[in-house]
Amino acid sequence: MPDDTSSQPPTGNPENPSPAQPIPPPIEQGVVRQASHTNTNEKPTNTAELAKDVHWIHYATLWSQIGLGLIGLGALWIYHGQLNVMNGQLEQMRGSGRQTDKLISLYQQQVAQLTKQAGDTHDLAVAAGTQAINAGEQVKKLEAGVKETHALATAAQTANKNAVEADRPWIGGALTVQDFEANKIPTYTIIWVNTGKRPAKITLTISKSGPFDFGVNPQYTGYHTVPSINLIVPGQPMTHAWQDDGPISEPEMAALKAGTLPFRVYAKIEYSDLRTNISYWTHMCWRYMPTMPYMNGGFANCAEYTDAK
């Protein structure tokens, strides 16, 4: 039998139809009514339980809200404590900041003071350098002054020495010869004269004459007695005279006049300055020159040995 609710033909083989479906039995009205009556009687019981559940839910909600409020109060108290701690820390930080500011200000003052001291030190160093330069220049000037003073002192000493020496005693001698002929004994006289400005103390006079030439080193004959001491004031003469041991022979005189035999007269005087006690001496030498008989009997000064100190 075809289905009215579908326009499709029934599936299956028409020659072999499918078995018929069973038809459900009709619902009994009494049963429906009974079920409906049963639900109506149970409705008040469910409402009371629901009200009871709502009441407990209300209380649970209230207590949860109270708990949440307490938790919020606790959290607020904790936050308040943390806020106080943070405020304290902030005050400490502010105090530390103020101390840091004070330290920074103090450091800045110290830096300024050190900078000022560094400037003062630099100024002092510059001043010390300037003073050192000035001192060096003054030292140079002092050295120059010392050198100049030394030069002046040396010049003064030299001038004083020259003055002293200029005023010292000076003794020179002049020779005269008599009887310088054959078969006669010659007489030799030396006049020593102090031409200086201070007295002289004579400590030695010695002489030697004869047919010899000693050059610069005459051989004097020693005295058998101690020489006498004489004083010669400025301008005073002193005589020293002697004779040969024997007369001059004719052959000897002929040789002297021919220039083949030399003849010398040597003399020496030693003396000292009475003021300074400085020792001096004078050496004299004369030679016989037969070609100049008109000059002091033919005797003239030698080129050697004649000297004075």
Image: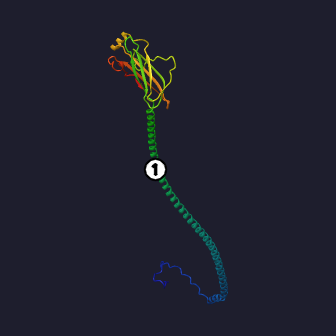
Q: Which residue is mark 1?
A: 134
- The residue carrying pointer 1 sits among few (fewer than 14), some (14 to 19) or many (20 or more) residues within 10 Å by Cα, namely few
Vertically, is 159 above or below 15? above
Picture coordinates of residue 104, whole percent (x, y): 55, 64
In this rendering, position of residue 75 left or right of residue 184: right
Q: Quadrant of residue 289?
A: top left
Q: Quadrant of residue 82?
A: bottom right
Callout 1: helix, strand or loop?
Answer: helix
- Rendered view: 106 above or below 77: above
Residue 259: quarter of image: top left
In the image, 44 versus 22, the foreground residue is 44
Horizontal and vertical percent for residue 177?
A: 39, 18
Q: Which residue occupies the foreground of this view, 302 or 182?
A: 182
Task: Answer left or right for 271 relative to 297.
Answer: right
Left or right side of 182 for 47: right
**Residue lying furthest left:** 291
**Count of picture labels:** 1
Seen in the image, is 262 located left or right of residue 149? left
3 and 46: which is toward the camera? 46
Image spot of residue 18 (x, y percent): 51, 79
Name the amino acid, label 1.
Asn
Q: Residue at x 57, y 67 (%)?
A: 98
Q: What colour scheme has been applied to the protein in the rendered image?
A: rainbow
Image quadrant occupied by the C terminus: top left
